[in-house]
Image: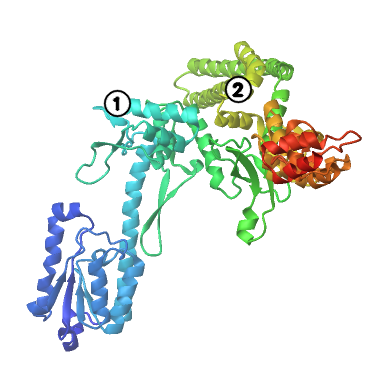
Amino acid sequence: MKSDPHQKVQASHLKRNAYLYIRQSTLRQVFENTESTKRQYALRQRAVALGWSEDRIIVIDSDLGQSGASSADREGFQRLVAEVGVGHAGIVLGLEVSRLARNSTDWHRLLEICAITDTLILDEDGVYDPAHFNDRLLLGLKGTMSEAELHVLRARLQGGILSKARRGELQMRLPVGFVYNAAGAVVLDPDQQVQHCLRWLFDTFRGTGSAMATARAAHHLELAFPRRCCKGPHKGELLWGSLGHSQVVRILHNPRYAGAFVYGRTHTRKTVDGRTRVIRAPRDQWDTLIPGAHAGYLSWEEYEQNQKRLHESAQVIGADRRRGAPREGPALLQGVVVCGRCGNRMTVRYHSRRGCLCPEYVCQREGIEQAEPVCQRIHGAGIDEAIGELLVEALNPLAIEVSLAVQRELQSRIEEADCLRHKQVERAQYEADLAQRRYMRVDPENRLVADSLEADWNHKLRALTEANEEYQRRREQDARILTDEQRAVIVSLASNFPRLWRDPATPDRERKRMIRLLLEDVTLSRGQQVTAQIRFKGGAHRTLKLPLPLKSWQQWVTPAAVIEEVDELLNRHTVLQIANMLNERGVPSGKGGPFNAKMVARLQRNYCLKPRYDRLREAGLLTLQEMADALHVTPTSVKIWNRRGLIRGHAYSDKNECLYEPPGNDPPRKAQGSKLSCRRRVPEVVSDRREEV
């Protein structure tokens, strides 16, 4: 290794440019730590002293205010590496290694390129040739120490932040609705409009159970919702705008609104391209969670309930599409139906029938993923009705009384256990008091005995504290047992449940909520009939056998009783007369509308009913020509005689086409027929009259 810097600088180096790289980590350092910037610019004189002219010294200072942890966003460093790689650089100048890079990957890449292109590196300590082993080793150690220094600095900062966060004293950016007072404590925003909007949001979600429904209600009311600007020229200002679904979800998931201090909900991770990615951590990985740290807009228990409801709603987009928020559709089993063939969750499809939405439960997950036919589809109207009747039958006062009797038995056992736990607390209190009296009576000069008794007293105090905490925790759990008033309310609810369920004014969404409170899931299987296996919340099971739902055309089929009535009426009436008679009696068609002649004729044809013409012919009635031949008159005369009542005809169509009863032994006379015919001036009838005269 050459110790003199001038011996390392060769003529080949002086023929190329000298690149001075200047960087400060943050903009604040650029404006406040000006001495470091001056020292970096002063390295130009070092390059001049080594033999470079002023015009061959190129300063790269475009990375001022950029962190050296990565080269992803440092255009100046990337330009430097490019110039070194093409052989334009004879020497690279930097105040210290940390100015060039604090990342070992970027630093060693630069060293490798400098070694290949025979480029020197200069810092405040001297000149190095990366092609020489000793210089390369020293530069590598400096880069490692620079990266370690960055981690040490971060660890110190993070340690201080975590220490304050664990005490709940760390001041963070507060969500809208909270501010810091003069003493640094978190209080509700004094703006009453902000408080009113947030309380309205939580009340609306409590009533709807859906974040989307809450956002939709705000849009319907044209409600202006507050938000606080986080960056830019309006940072910290309160802005008003429309309430979106994402904002509702963020507010509902934020535990600060329940008065809890939380830190560490998100973590940042570096990606391959140097960018940062924010990852939400589960609750058990949060660094700090202190419920009740400050005032809130809802209790912690209600916050937990909201998280549970949001989790159930989010499961609709999960792998098995388990739940989903109750919607407005009439499918009562939405989100709780399981396919009896493959075990996957079934989705809901709606069809319009007779102006109403009819649900259909479809198992199509494998069909979509594997391009296979749908596993099974089942019409849901009949199933929903059967499930509703089952719930009305199951939720009766007798069953509720039995459940409450079991609850009272559990209450008595809990009271006995509470008494035993309280005695344990009393024993721990007695032992702590005894240890205190022993310690107070000891001679202070006898330090060996005093220290032992003090340690025993501390141990007893810790045991007393643990016993008290366990006792209070178990009491809070036992307090969930129903009181007498709550039992009376539940019994009255069981009595009013059928009326509430069957009330047309009860929304489908509320019925779905009732079902989810009572049922765990419903498994459907379609074969010769539909099998519904119902699993209740308490673990009870019921199985229903239901007939296959009718197809749409089957629902439009005319009842058999109507067909029989039409068959009977065809003996005496035409199709139009039959349609009018059915409508007068209020008999609906298969689609629920009135009858017409075409519908009756189609029923006659489709059900192979004997036409009225054939029925009259079988009864011996004659056609028009046959009747004219039998009476020895023209067909027109037969029609005229029929209208005058001289002969009897029976209509077999709505065009007044008739079949006639045989004349028998006493047919009408021709004279009568001739007079009638003369009035219409029929030539044939006049000739008959002359012959008769």
- The image's mark for residue 264 is none
Please tell me which residue lies in front, 3 or 492. 492
Which residue does the numbered mark 1 point to in the structure image?
A: 193
Please tell me which residue lies in front, 2 or 235. 235
Three-letter code for the amino acid on which mark 1 is drawn: Gln
Q: Position of residue 664 (x, y in %)?
A: 90, 36
Vertical side of 317 occupied by 470: above or below: above
Q: Position of residue 383 (x, y in %)?
A: 70, 36
Confirm or deny contact between disc 2 and disc 1 (CB under 8 A): no
Residue 543 visible at all:
no
Between label 2 and label 1, give the one nearer the viewer.
2
Give the residue at x 45% y 38%: 212
Mark 1 surroundings within 10 Å by alpha-carbon count, few (fewer than 14), some (14 through 19), many (20 or more) = few
Q: Earlier in the sequence, mark 2 or mark 1?
A: 1
Which of the image's four quarters has the C terminus? top right
Q: Residue furthest left?
A: 54
Q: Position of residue 192 (x, y in %)?
A: 29, 24
Task: Give the side of residue 115 with respect to residue 347, left or right.
Answer: left
The part of the image, by quadrant, that contains residue 384 is top right
Give the residue at x 83% y 35%: 669
Please tell me which residue lies in front, 176 or 329. 329
The part of the image, by quadrant, that contains residue 110 is bottom left
| Label 1 residue SS | helix
Three-letter code for the amino acid on which mark 2 is drawn: Asp
- The image's mark for residue 503 is 2
Q: Position of residue 629 (x, y in %)?
A: 83, 46
Please tell me which residue lies in front, 368 or 291. 368
Q: Residue furthest bottom?
A: 11
